[in-house]
Amino acid sequence: MAEIVITPTGTDALEVGAFIDNDGRRFVGLSFKMDNGDYTVVTLTVPLFNAYSEHLAKASAQFASEDYWRTVPR
């Protein structure tokens, strides 16, 4: 089980940005706004972010189906 669970709420709770570090490596940063106003930031390499985005798109399509939700444990 995870030590920390982040549950963003509201449309402004998640921001995405890109940056280049001092060595020229490219990263994508996901910034989650916490209820207390602080932020938790997760950084991913661009290839990992691209793979993660593809995974999220597939998962999103599944989650849109009522058939899927009938299989989810309660």
Image (tube, rainbow, N blue to C red):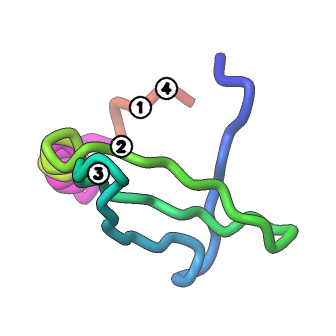
- Going from N to C along the chain, the mark reached first, 1 or 3, is 3
What residue do we see at 51% from left, 70% from top?
A: 14
- Going from N to C along the chain, the mark reached first, 3 or 4, is 3
Specify the label residue 63 is tagged with.
3
- Magenta segment, prevailing SS (helix, strand or loop): helix
Q: How many residues crowd mark 4 within 10 Å: few (<14), some (14–19), many (20+)?
A: few
Image coords of residue 64 (percent x, y): 25, 59
Q: How many residues crowd mark 2 within 10 Å: few (<14), some (14–19), many (20+)?
A: few
Image coords of residue 32 (percent x, y): 59, 63
**Amino acid bearing label 3:** Phe
Residue designated by label 2: 69
Q: Which residues are magenta?
A: 55-69
Badge 1 marks a residue whose secondary structure is loop
Badge 2 marks a residue whose secondary structure is helix
Dots 2, 4 in contact, CB < 8 A: no
How many labels were placed on the picture? 4
Specify the label residue 73 is tagged with.
4
Residue designated by label 1: 72
Badge 4 marks a residue whose secondary structure is loop
**Amino acid bearing label 1:** Val
Q: Quick one: which residue is furthest to the right in this view?
A: 36
The C terminus - image quarter: top right
Dots 1, 4 in contact, CB < 8 A: yes
